[in-house]
Image: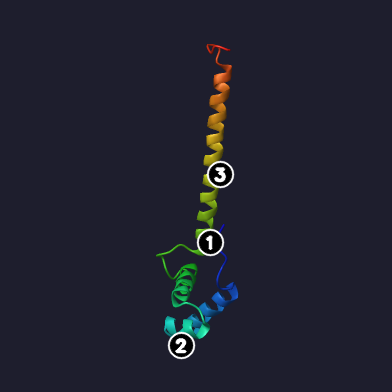
Amino acid sequence: MAAPKKYPDELRARAVRLYRESDPKPTIRRLADHLGVHHEALRNWIRQAEADAGERSDRPTTDMAEENKRLRQENMELRRANEILKAASAYFAAELDPTRRRS
């Protein structure tokens, strides 16, 4: 289970909007201090917003990251189911083996 978010989504959206709409651009540290958030958190929010807008190619978009997370979980579930089926198959194969001596 993921950790709870430290900052509400509304604050994140507002902070990114303030940074992007400001002219001239304030320093991230100064804006973060003004909003009462950590400057690295604000920097990450801005970078993610730029990736979502197609302005950056060095990190995945939010949709792509969510899809990757969903696919990793699905892959993990399928691997687990596959292991269960392998174990069941081996068990039933041993039960049906005519050369096996029964005690």
x and y, in percent, of residue 102 in the image: 58, 12
Marking on residue 63: 1
Among the two numbered marks 2 and 1 on one chain, the one whose residue lies closer to the N terminus:
2
| Amino acid type of the residue tagged 1 in the rendering | Asp
Element on which disc 3 rests: helix
Discs 3, 2 touching: Cβ within 8 Å = no
**Crowd tier of the residue under label 1, counting other residues whose Cα lies within 10 Å: few below 14, some 14–19, many 20 or above:** few
Note whether 59 is above or below 30 in the view shown. above
Among the two numbered marks 3 and 2 on one chain, the one whose residue lies closer to the N terminus:
2
x and y, in percent, of residue 43 in the image: 44, 75
Give the label, 3 or 2, closer to the camera: 3
Report the Cα–Cα distance between label 2 and label 1: 29 Å
Element on which disc 1 rests: helix
Marking on residue 77: 3
Going 43% across and 64% down the picture, which residue do you hit?
A: 59
Report the Cα–Cα distance between label 3 and label 2: 49 Å
Q: Which color scheme does this rendered protein use?
A: rainbow
Marking on residue 10: none
